[in-house]
Image (spheres, rainbow, N blue to C red):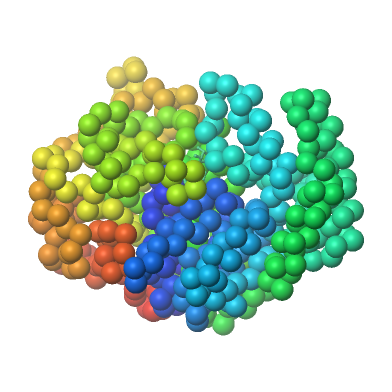
Amino acid sequence: MPTVVVVGAQWGDEAKGKVVDCLAQDADMVVRYGGGSNAGHTVRFDGHEFKLHLVPSGIFRPQVTNIIASGVVVDPQVLVEEIRSLQAEGVSVHNLKVSASAHVVMPYHRLLDSLEEKQRGSAQIGTTCRGIGPAYADKAARKGIRMADLRHPERFAAVLRNSVEEKSRLLKLVYDADCPSFDDIWREYEQYAEVLRPLITDTDPLVYRAVKEGQRVVFEGAQGTLLDLDHGTYPYVTSSHPVAGGACVGTGIGPTHIDAVIGVAKAYTTRVGSGAFPTELLNETGSYLRERGREYGTTTGRPRRCGWLDTVVLRYSAQVNGLTAFAMTLLDVLSGLDTVQVCCAYRLPSGEVIEQFPSDSAVLKECEPVYESLPGWKEEIADVRRWDDLPEQAKRYVQRVEELTGVPVAMVSVGPLRSQTFWRHGVSGDAPVRSLKELAEGHALA
Ligand code: IMP
């Protein structure tokens, strides 16, 4: 199969886990390339529901090698808990590998994350407080601890001692807070290390070999394009690179090895945490979407902000990720509305209408959405399994998104279950679209 990157096309929580799980059916390897336990991927099948934070969504397919790559920051406490709860449910993790180059989230990272948030006051980012920003900051400052260090107790002790010394001073001087002691962290992390040691390896060559041998590899993104550190709505972003390019940096393969990029987009938009959100609905329709879409965070339980679909965002996402297709999720949530609105441009305070997503968050905050109204549909569609069986208005909605973005919608999801997904083999007769399944099976790309 070609190698496929699965990215969030909006602000995260687009149900990427479900799309990766479906693709994993035909895959040899699933590689998580960035972020950390701030992510929450829900996978439901056979009456089970699994919430994954770090383990790739291919773990439920025994034939798939699952890799947590170098670009991820790993909280060993979360990973060990996740491994144990998977095993308790009878899911084997024999096929899980963790990169020796991945950085480790430490207790002082979580503490710093919370303290920094508190200090920001009304300018809070609304982080998940999982230590993600501080862990990536240490990585960039070249003073992080890596999974490789956990393999060697003496080496780990040395780097940990240095870090605790530095963080103790920082926490005391800036926040008047105490850093957890070396002894406490050491005792706790040695237990995690014992579980994780057999999984830690150099993953870059494994991924490279798989790609070179023509194996079917899915690169699983976390968060979403608009949370990207460089390309998102800075500073209301995460500290990693969820965009498709992050798959190269985070796993050690070159851009020429990526064949397809699937942008996962909800049929509407959500956002967690602070920051501009032009199509946000602070009314009954927003609550309707939240309740029908079960829009509460997998990681933090926070209610998500909800709004209409924004194709300015999706066009931008297509641009920065080089999307070859969209997977549209949660289309069923829109059932029951008289009309559905799609944002196709923004109006600036000057009256000027722009179609390009502004890079400056302060400008985005001022943007008013320009909507197009489309007829809604009353029918529940959770039982629909074929494109042809969708109500005409729902089809029209999806097709309009394709027209406004120039990107085909190759897959549609109408509910949380594996079975509530269908691939589209073509749109509007003469414009055939490569389905995800075709991509997964290795057919040539258009
Ligand atoms: P952090 O990644 O915890 O530092 O949080 C930074 C921003 O990204 C906050 O607005 C979070 O709500 C958001 N964020 C982080 N991870 C996710 C995710 O998996 N889904 C949606 N938003 C996220």
In front here: 180 or 395? Answer: 180
The N terminus lies in which quarter of the figure?
A: bottom left
Relative vertical location of residue 278 with respect to residue 248 in this rendering, above or below:
above
Task: For residue 313, say whether it is visible.
Answer: no
Q: How many marks?
A: 0
Residue 108: x percent and y percent? 73, 41
Q: Residue at x 71, y 45 (%)?
A: 107
Q: Is residue 294 left or right of residue 36?
A: left
Q: Residue at x 27, y 59 (%)?
A: 415
Task: For residue 301, say whether it is visible.
Answer: yes
Q: Find residue 434 and report its image quarter.
A: bottom left
The C terminus lies in which quarter of the figure?
A: bottom left
Relative vertical location of residue 78 with respect to residue 286 in this rendering, above or below:
below
Q: Find residue 380 and report its image quarter.
A: bottom left
Q: Is residue 374 left or right of residue 298?
A: left
Residue 254: x percent and y percent? 60, 65
Q: Residue at x 75, y 55 (%)?
A: 188
Residue 218: x percent and y percent? 49, 68
Residue 193: x percent and y percent? 75, 63
Q: Residue at x 75, y 56 (%)?
A: 189
Q: Is residue 245 left or right of residue 410?
A: right
In front here: 328 or 13? Answer: 13
Relative vertical location of residue 251 with respect to residue 245 in this rendering, above or below:
below
Q: Is residue 139 left or right of residue 97?
A: right
